[in-house]
Amino acid sequence: MDAILSRLFSSEEEELYVLDCLGYFMIFMAACTFVALLFQDVPYGRYAPSTARFRVDARIAWFVQELPAFLVPFCLVVWTSSAKTSLLPNQLVIAMYFCHYIQRSLIYPFLIRGGKPTPLDSFVLAIMFCMYNGYMQIRYLSHYADYPAHWVTHPRFIAGSVLWLVGWLVNMHSDHILRNLRKPGETGYKIPIGGLFEYVSGANFLGEITEWAGFALAGYSVHSTAFAIFTAVVLSSRAVSHHKWYHAKFEDYPKSRKALIPFLF
């Protein structure tokens, strides 16, 4: 991996500059995505067009598209001269990232029950994004992020870590609820009940948004912040779309339930 990176970049300064540019470009992509999502939902899952010519099985799609988000960072940590991985602050922030993607790429796809096939274009874009973001996050954290020695006791890091943990637990619990809505052999959609679904339609999305917001606060870089912003844009739009969809499909859908933020929105 070091040999590959040395061919791509003439110096560490050049690579760090590229990493910063990738972070700012992701923020730009988030702004463009926000505008695009005002007119069209992300075309996968229940919003996948039935006219899509090439589609990938849901389990295969989730596994393959999320795997680069684990494999690329794993290779960067194991097979490069990762100068900062011996430092506790870097280790903890890297661990937050891996905790999510070990579950998301190696466990979650095999727990899916049913699921609609993913259009090929959405599948390919997801692979590209996971490679892009995986490289940006972990290369910066493992080789360039320079935190003060007391960072792990700083209020910003502590608050970010707590947010990350709460978001991760909410996301995991909400996914568990969604997986168990239908009994074996049942088909069709049901109203989610339990956990934060009692208050919002997008409890799983709220959990993941909170998780990456905490990651951004603890990591305190343009790279982690860009990912948190992009995640918030995509998942908040999806939560709103789900909320409208539930109300249109179920006459008895709870009127007091909000889309994403309990009691507010």
Image (cartoon, rainbow, N blue to C red):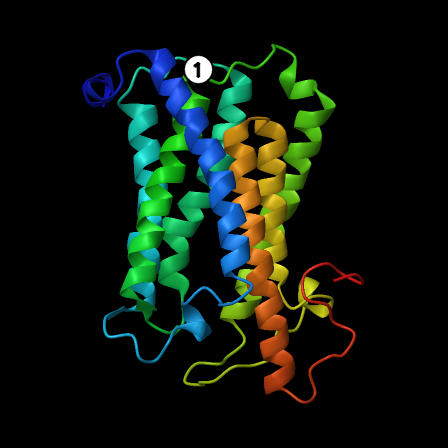
Q: Which residue is mark 1?
A: 84
Q: Where is residue 200 shown, x and y percent of the image?
A: 69, 66
Relative side of 148 to 12, left or right = right
Q: Identify the image quadrant of the C terminus.
A: bottom right
Q: Is 11 left, or right, of 176 in this rendering?
A: left
Q: Nearer the viewer, residue 60 or 186?
A: 60
Q: Looking at the rendering, in which quadrant would you find the N terminus? A: top left
Give the vertical position of 155 relative to 185 (above or below). Answer: above
- From this viewpoint, is residue 173 visible? no
Say above or below: 213 vs 116: above
Q: Position of residue 212 (x, y in %)?
A: 57, 42
Query: In the picture, residue 110 is in which quadrant?
Result: bottom left
7 to the left or right of 77: left
Residue at 40% in and 72% down: 113
- Say which quarter of the image contains residue 82: top left
Residue 40 vertical position relative to residue 247 in the rendered view, above or below:
above
Where in the figure is residue 5, as x and y percent of width and height? 25, 21
- The local secondary structure at tag 1 comes to loop
Considering depth in this image, is 178 or 124 the residue closer to the camera? 124
Residue type marked 1: Lys
Drawn side of residue 88 relative to residue 76, left or right: right
Q: How many marks?
A: 1
> Is any part of residue 64 visible from this angle?
yes
Residue at 62 percent across and 76 percent down: it is 244
Label 1 CA crowd tier, 10 Å (few <14, some 14–19, many 20+): many
Q: Looking at this view, is 31 or 205 the one in front?
A: 31
